[in-house]
Image (spheres, grey):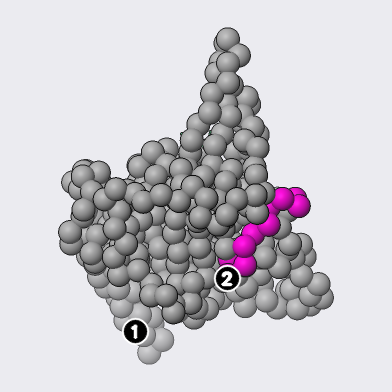
């Protein structure tokens, strides 16, 4: 699937942590702001019209909305350094969004605009400070501690840097089975079968089950992270810069894999990226963020053809457009050459 042979180990070092992932909560001098229970306010709390952010071609009222955020805000209180003052960072400010089943919402914006904060809220890793999140129509209760595990398993996340989330001493089979141990009561034999099946679904091999993370290339490790996220049968996958650390040809392969998986499992994606050529390739709808706020949203075609907000236009102008079609064509050429060679060998 997807020319996995192109994806050789050591092509490129994964980038350093980008401020997301499991480590971020332990940052010194940082603590999450007090989170209000979502019931404390009406659903529309914090909602306000965003100038220049018309909703165009959004899902109609009858659409099957799998994920919805209403007036989501998130503040962080950070210590102000030497004099010990406290500062509040408004990372996400009154963000509304909804995603229909099987669709991809891309969130774009430059570093620090709040994309990963929103990702952590959607995947129930962090609560919003205010606002309401609805998953498959169910409002998420954040007042009583962790949300129930059946709700948690509906939304999974894949980070940019799978290194951070893969334990170097854990075999891949265990990496995949672990979410089932934590979230289901499936017997061991079934956990193993599912993990082996999932390896195949993401273009890896059954014998990879007993290998360790360091034996894989960056692209393969991202396949493992995707497989792990899918183990608990989620409805929604949040992909936070999932291909940003990969070589371009490997990016195309992983994006193709994601497209295949979306179709096969009817998955809904929230795809976070600063790379507009990737967004153009994968998104149904696009939401542009600037300093914690949404400044533009709409269907991919509408936003790309006719960006309304000045910031969106600046963002587009600043982005070198890599040509994914050319990359895909190259990957396909390589794959067909390989097939031809294999046929030659077989016919000898
Ligand atoms: P992005 O993913 O778009 O680069 P982030 O969501 O990571 O942006 O960050 C948004 C803002 O919130 C930034 O100003 C960042 O410094 C701040 N921030 C993110 N996480 C934390 C945290 N755990 N503590 C304090 N500030 C944070
Ligand atoms: Mg980020």
Helix, strand or loop: magenta stretch: loop
* Quadrant placement of the N terminus: bottom left
* Quadrant placement of the C terminus: bottom left
Please, is residue 312 above or below residue 134 in the view?
A: above
Please, is residue 263 above or below residue 277 in the view?
A: below
Query: In the visual, does 116 lie left or right of 198?
Result: left
- Magenta residue check for 169: no
Q: Quadrant of residue 97?
A: bottom left
User: Can residue 59 be seen at all in this image of the molecule?
Assistant: yes
- Return the residue at label 2: 136
- Magenta residue check for 141: yes
Tell me the distance, in whole angstroms, between the alpha carbons under discs 2 and 1: 51 Å
The range drawn in magenta is: 135-145
Q: Which element carries disc 1, helix, strand or loop?
A: helix
Q: Is mark 1 within 8 Å of ligand 2?
A: no
Query: In the visual, does 174 lie left or right of 138?
Result: right
Q: Looking at this view, is 9 or 140 the one in front?
A: 140
Residue 303, percent across and down?
A: 24, 60
Q: Residue at the spot x=61%, y=29% of the render?
A: 30
Disc on the earlier residue, 2 or 1: 2
Q: Residue at the spot x=73%, y=62% of the render?
A: 148
- Residue found at the far top of this picture: 83
User: Can residue 215 be seen at all in this image of the molecule?
Assistant: no
Q: Looking at this view, is 119 or 293 the one in front?
A: 293
Residue 217, percent across and down?
A: 49, 55
Q: Residue at the spot x=54%, y=37% of the render?
A: 75
State which mark lies toward you, 2 or 1.
2
Residue 344 numbered tag: 1
Mark 1 burial class by Cα count in 10 Å: few <14, some 14-19, many 20+: few
């Amino acid at each position: 699937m997807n020319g996995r042979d192109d994806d050789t180990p050591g092509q490129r070092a994964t980038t350093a942590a980008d401020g997301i992932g499991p480590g971020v909560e332990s940052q010194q001098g940082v603590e999450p702001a007090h989170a209000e229970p979502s019931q404390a306010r009406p659903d529309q709390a914090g909602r306000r019209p965003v100038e220049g952010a018309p909703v165009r071609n959004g899902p109609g009222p009858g659409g099957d909305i799998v994920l919805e955020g209403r007036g989501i805000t998130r503040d962080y209180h950070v210590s102000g350094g030497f004099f010990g003052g406290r500062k509040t960072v408004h990372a996400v400010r009154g963000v509304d969004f909804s995603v229909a089943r099987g669709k991809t919402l891309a969130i774009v914006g430059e570093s620090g605009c709040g994309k990963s904060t929103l990702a952590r809220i959607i995947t129930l890793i962090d609560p919003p400070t205010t606002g309401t999140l609805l998953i498959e129509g169910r409002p998420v209760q954040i007042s009583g501690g962790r949300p129930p595990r059946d709700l948690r398993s509906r939304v999974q996340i894949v980070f940019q840097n799978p290194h951070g989330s893969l334990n170097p001493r854990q075999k891949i089979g265990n990496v995949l089975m672990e979410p089932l141990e934590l979230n289901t009561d499936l017997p061991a034999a079934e956990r193993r079968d599912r993990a082996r099946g999932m390896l195949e679904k993401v273009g890896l091999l059954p014998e990879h089950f007993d290998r360790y993370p360091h034996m894989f290339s960056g692209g393969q490790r991202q396949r493992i992270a995707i497989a792990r996220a899918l183990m608990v049968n989620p409805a929604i996958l949040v992909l936070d810069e999932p291909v940003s650390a990969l070589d371009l040809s490997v990016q195309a392969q992983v994006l193709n894999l994601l497209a295949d998986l979306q179709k096969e499992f009817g998955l809904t994606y929230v795809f976070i990226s600063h790379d507009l050529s990737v967004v153009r390739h994968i998104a149904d709808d696009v939401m542009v963020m600037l300093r914690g706020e949404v400044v533009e949203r709409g269907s991919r075609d509408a936003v790309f053809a006719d960006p309304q907000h000045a910031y969106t236009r600046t963002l587009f102008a600043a982005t070198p457009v890599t040509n994914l079609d050319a990359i895909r064509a190259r990957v396909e050429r390589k794959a067909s050459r390989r097939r031809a060679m294999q046929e030659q060998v077989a016919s000898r």
